[in-house]
Image: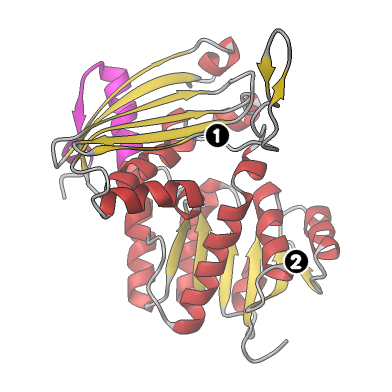
Amino acid sequence: MTKAQLPIGLIGAGRIGRVHAQHLSHRIARAKLLMVSDICEESAQQCAAQFDVEQTTTDYRRVLEHPDIRAVVICSSTDTHAQIIEEAAECGKQIFCEKPIDHGLDKIDRALQSVERADVLLQIGFNRRFDANFRRIRDAVVQGEIGNPHLLHIISRDPSPPPIEYVKVSGGLFLDMTIHDLDMARYLMGQEVEEIYASGAVLIDPAIGEAGDLDTAVIVLKFAGGAIGTIDNSRQAVYGYDQRAEVFGSGGSVQTGNNWPNQVTVLGRKSVTRDLPLNFFMERYLDSYLDEMRQFVEAVVTGGPSPMSGQEGRISVVMGLAAWKSHQENRPVRLDEIDPV
């Protein structure tokens, strides 16, 4: 380990934890992954062996207490995020935490207060902000290339639903899946959302409805600047991972389509075809996961601001709660009904 490297501990060695472990170990020169923690000893050991990490533990507190570790990456289950953030802040660690901080604003606020008291950096893992396609839309809006933005449309559809056991603890569609799109709406438009109307249904799997969740939804957003946004979500797009966005303005439009495994088009006598779009979020957003972690490491090393602050992450939860309330009460809900502050 060189002096320029940042010693990091990973908490949670599941699917997304392993993505971050690979990047920290092999793709970010200024990072050094020192320890992997997971409540499942086998998962921690497998992750460590795969990515050349020397130390493992089943107790995340050993990561927080490690004298050499300066920063932690939290990829454990959502219900543990707020508590671990608080404890990490008290130990003086710089913190990256996967979204969301929690499903409850009280727990989120306590965690953010701990971060503020300890004066440590907190970055929340909304990786889509670091996607090159969406960043270009944001730049076009900010730079005035399309005039004043009037309409936003985000299409976000998964190739297949998650397991029912995951659905039961996910916080529901709006706090699990849509929360990414709610954050993207604010990011792309550069405006705050004042009101949300959400309509949802169970059209794919009755078991999702039995678990108290939805699998299909349309959300209408009213922005502070007067623009209108729509988000449409589905848990099952049979053709692959469908991720598109457009901002339409007084001077034009900026949009991005899906990412594809190749750029080949096959032209035949009766049809013109191409392969299906990428089928999994890990493939579609792999580069964005790398960039968000690289920016986290850079911010810690240089003392810069958080690329995605805890307060930004909190707003997305407020929006998700407003969407749930809107669906349940079948009416538009202002964000200040959820969070008067």
Q: Residues within 10 Å of mark 1 (few under 14, many from 20)?
A: some
As helix, strand or loop, the secondary structure at mark 2 comes to: strand
Tell me, yes or no, whether the highlighted magenta stretch contains residue 326.
Answer: yes
Q: Is residue 316 above or below residue 302?
A: above
For marks 1 and 2, the one nearer the N-term is 2
Q: Amino acid at mark 2?
A: Thr
Q: CA distance from mark 1 to mark 2?
A: 39 Å
Q: Is residue 293 above or below residue 75?
A: below
Q: Position of residue 62 (x, y in %)?
A: 67, 72
Residue 104 can be seen in this image: no
- Circle 1 is placed at which residue position? 258
Q: Which residue occupies the foreground of this view, 119 or 184?
A: 184
Tell me, yes or no, whether the highlighted magenta stretch contains residue 97.
Answer: no
Q: Position of residue 337 (x, y in %)?
A: 18, 36
Q: Is residue 128 above or below residue 181?
A: below
Q: Is residue 217 left or right of residue 78?
A: left
Q: Specify the segment rendered in magenta.
A: 319-338
Residue 94 can be seen in this image: yes
Q: Position of residue 5 (x, y in %)?
A: 64, 83
